[in-house]
Image: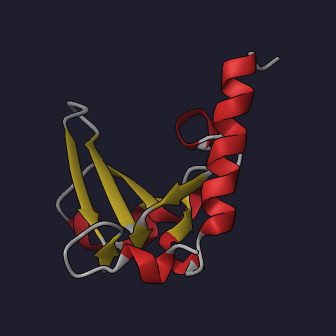
Amino acid sequence: MLTEQEALTNSADDAKISNLRDKSYVIDSNEAIHLKLIKSEQDLKDEDTTFYPNYTYQLFGEDEQIIGYKNLKVELYYVASTLYTFLRMSFDQKLGSPDCDPIAVLT
């Protein structure tokens, strides 16, 4: 059960999403996150070893959406033997960056 504060936060987040004119700044977090368990060097280049999370609501809320990035890709690789991690984020544009006009994106 949500607390009153969590409910207010969730409704505020929903309002932010609905106010976005350009929906390309909203991405499904389950599609944006690319995971790999690296066992050998070949796994780095092999797209068949990439998998995607089924659920990300624990991190990104009930809607499982990431707001503010256009064409976001989050690559999170784990080395199987040590569980060392490698994280890389790439995107075409970030909401609020100098080359992005927030007035054009928000209503």
Please give the name of the residue rendered at 63% of the width and 67% of the height, measured from the top-left corner.
Answer: 19
What residue occupies the far right of the structure in this picture? 1
Please give the name of the residue rendered at 69% of the width and 65% of the height, measured from the top-left corner.
Answer: 18
Closest to the observer, 100 or 35: 100
Q: Can you say which quadrant of the picture contains the N terminus?
A: top right
Residue 6 found in image quarter: top right
Residue 5 percent location from the top left of the image: 67, 21
For this view, does 34 lie left or right of residue 86? right
Q: Is there any visible trace of residue 54 in the rendered image? A: no
How many marks can you see? 0
Residue 24 percent location from the top left of the image: 53, 79
Q: Can you say which quadrant of the picture contains the C terminus?
A: bottom right
Q: Is there any visible trace of residue 15 in the rendered image? A: yes
| Colour pattern of the rendering | secondary structure
For this view, does 101 lie left or right of residue 33? left
For this view, does 65 lie left or right of residue 95? right
Closest to the observer, 104 or 10: 104
Please give the name of the residue rendered at 36% of the width and 68% of the height, measured from the top-left corner.
Answer: 95
Residue 55 found in image quarter: top right
Residue 104 percent location from the top left of the image: 45, 84
Residue 34 percent location from the top left of the image: 42, 60
Position of 97 relative to 4 (above/below): below
